[in-house]
Amino acid sequence: AHRVVTAAHITSSMCFAWSMLWVVKWEVVLMPWPVTEGVPGKMVTALLVSALVFVMITVLDKIADSDHTSHEVDQSIFQMIFSVSLMVGFSWGGAFRAAIANVCLIFPTWERIWMQLLLTFCMIIIVLPAWRLHILPKVAVWKAPIIDARETHALIKS
């Protein structure tokens, strides 16, 4: 039963992230700027999503850190932070995919596939070590059992 609930949480988080990303994409398309399509549009979308999610995470984290929320509410807030963080990854993934495809347009058709593969491997070589060194340790700490601040305060007093 626990696995089913966890899978449902992850699935609903991904659905929420994709839905919100499509809302932002739609809003970018409706903007009167000349950079709403193609690679520039995807970059604007990724930057906009990153800024929006930064503000959302900051606010949600302040709420979770307050003494007015229970442990269950804090867990729900952390789930929301996870959901909006997925949206950032999805938006930048789309921007990088579009950029690689656009760069490869200068090559003939049969070379384009190999060039896309080469550029994808270059991205993996650059991004994967940074992800492993900087993001993965933070996720491991976040997934560890969270001790409630009130419990910590009670332990310190005794």
Image (tube, rainbow, N blue to C red):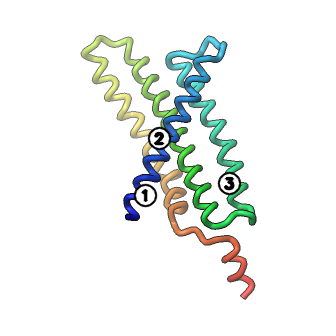
- The amino acid on which the numbered mark 3 sits, given as a three-letter code, is Asp
Q: Nearer the viewer, mark 3 or mark 2?
A: 2
Given residues 12 and 87, the one toward you in this image is: 12
- Residue, disc 1: 6
Task: Please say if the residues under marks 3 and 2 sit with CB atoms less than 8 Å apart.
Answer: no
Q: Earlier in the sequence, mark 3 or mark 1?
A: 1
- Residue, disc 2: 15
Give the quarter of the figure containing the N terminus: bottom left
Given residues 149 and 68, the one toward you in this image is: 68
Determine the CA span between mark 3 and mark 2. Answer: 22 Å
Residue 83: % across, % down: 53, 46
| 97 left or right of 144 in image | left
Residue under the point 66% across and 13% down:
32
Residue under the point 69% across and 48% down:
58
Badge 1 density bin: few <14, some 14–19, many ≥20, Cα 10 Å: few
Q: Is residue 130 visible?
A: no
Residue 140: % across, % down: 49, 60
Task: Please say if the residues under marks 1 and 2 sit with CB atoms less than 8 Å apart.
Answer: no
| 157 left or right of 38 in image | right
* Residue positioned most to the front: 1
Circle 3 — which element? helix
Specify the quadrant of the image occupied by residue 68: bottom right
- The amino acid on which the numbered mark 1 sits, given as a three-letter code, is Thr
- Residue, disc 3: 61
* Residue positioned most to the bottom: 158
- The amino acid on which the numbered mark 2 sits, given as a three-letter code, is Cys
Q: Earlier in the sequence, mark 1 or mark 2?
A: 1
Residue under the point 42% across and 24% down:
100
Specify the quadrant of the image occupied by residue 77: bottom right
Residue 13: % across, % down: 49, 46
